[in-house]
Image (cartoon, rainbow, N blue to C red):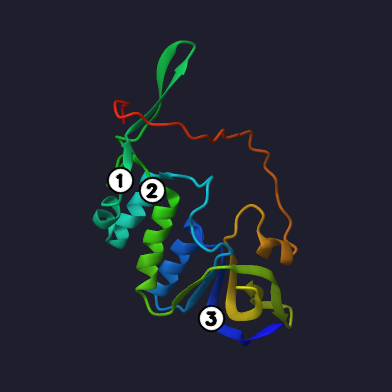
Amino acid sequence: MTSSRASLPSSCCIAGAGPAGLMLGYLLARNSIPVTVLEKHADFLRDFRGDTIHPSTLEIIWRLGFLEEFLALPHQKAERLSGEIDGQEATMADFTRLPTQCKYIAFMPQWDFLNFINAKAAELPGFTLIHNAQVDGLIEAQGKVCGVKATIDGEQQKIRSELVIGCDGRNSAVRKHADLAVQNFGAPCDVLWLKIAKLPDDPE
């Protein structure tokens, strides 16, 4: 079944409202480019989200002019990261010498970060975020991608756009439907993610 709103126009359609998708959507709308961002989930409240806001990201937020407002959100700061190797404590990373406004990593739930960027983007004309929107395929004409087919709140719709950008993660639907090959670099990196209780007398 196709919705009566079957063809929604947009200059740019971004699949995925993670940090990359939302920030790109904000920057495009800030430059008066109509943009629609599609997010397959109903909200941003999901586990296994990176909770680190790095100095380079904080620098971008400062350059955009809302760092003070952003840092008013609950967060923790880490100027250095240390570890123990063979019984000896070692500094793994030291951010205090970086040529940035914020010389630390900020630990903040990613949903707070995404809600903040979305709120800023929503103030701009031409920005649209659609939740519960799953990309089902690409619209092609004369050998060119000109939009996406998506299921939005259970209804099939078409969003026509001059540019389609896949920011929908490692299992990207946009990449799959575009038949783009994945290049695996075999980076030997694993992350063990777990939650532990934080006691009142624990250090920062």
Number of disc labels:
3
Q: Earlier in the sequence, mark 1 or mark 3?
A: 3
Image x and y of residue 183, in percent: 70, 49
Q: Are marks 2 and 1 in contact (CB under 8 Å)?
A: yes
Residue 170 visible to the viewer: yes
Amino acid marked by disc 3: Ser
Residue at (51%, 47%) from the top-left corner? Answer: 49
Image x and y of residue 171, in percent: 67, 54
Q: Which type of secondary structure does the marked residue at label 1 adopt?
A: loop
Structural distance between the alpha carbons of marks 1 and 3:
35 Å
Residue at (32%, 40%) from the top-left corner? Answer: 76
Image x and y of residue 168, in percent: 59, 59
Residue beneath label 2, please? Answer: 56
The one of 181 and 69 positioned closer to us in this rendering: 69
Residue beneath label 1, please? Answer: 100
Q: Earlier in the sequence, mark 3 or mark 2?
A: 3
From the viewer's perspective, tell me whether residue 66 is left or right of residue 193: left
* Vertical side of 144 occupied by 187: above or below: above
Assign the C terminus to one quadrant of the image.
top left
* Vertical side of 47 occupied by 141: above or below: below
The one of 17 and 152 positioned closer to us in this rendering: 152
Q: Which type of secondary structure does the marked residue at label 3 adopt?
A: strand
Residue 178 visible to the viewer: no
Structural distance between the alpha carbons of marks 2 and 1:
7 Å
The one of 48 and 33 positioned closer to us in this rendering: 48
Residue beneath label 3, please? Answer: 10
Amino acid marked by disc 1: Thr
Q: Earlier in the sequence, mark 2 or mark 1?
A: 2
* Vertical side of 204 occupied by 179: above or below: below
Residue at (36%, 75%) from the top-left corner? Answer: 124
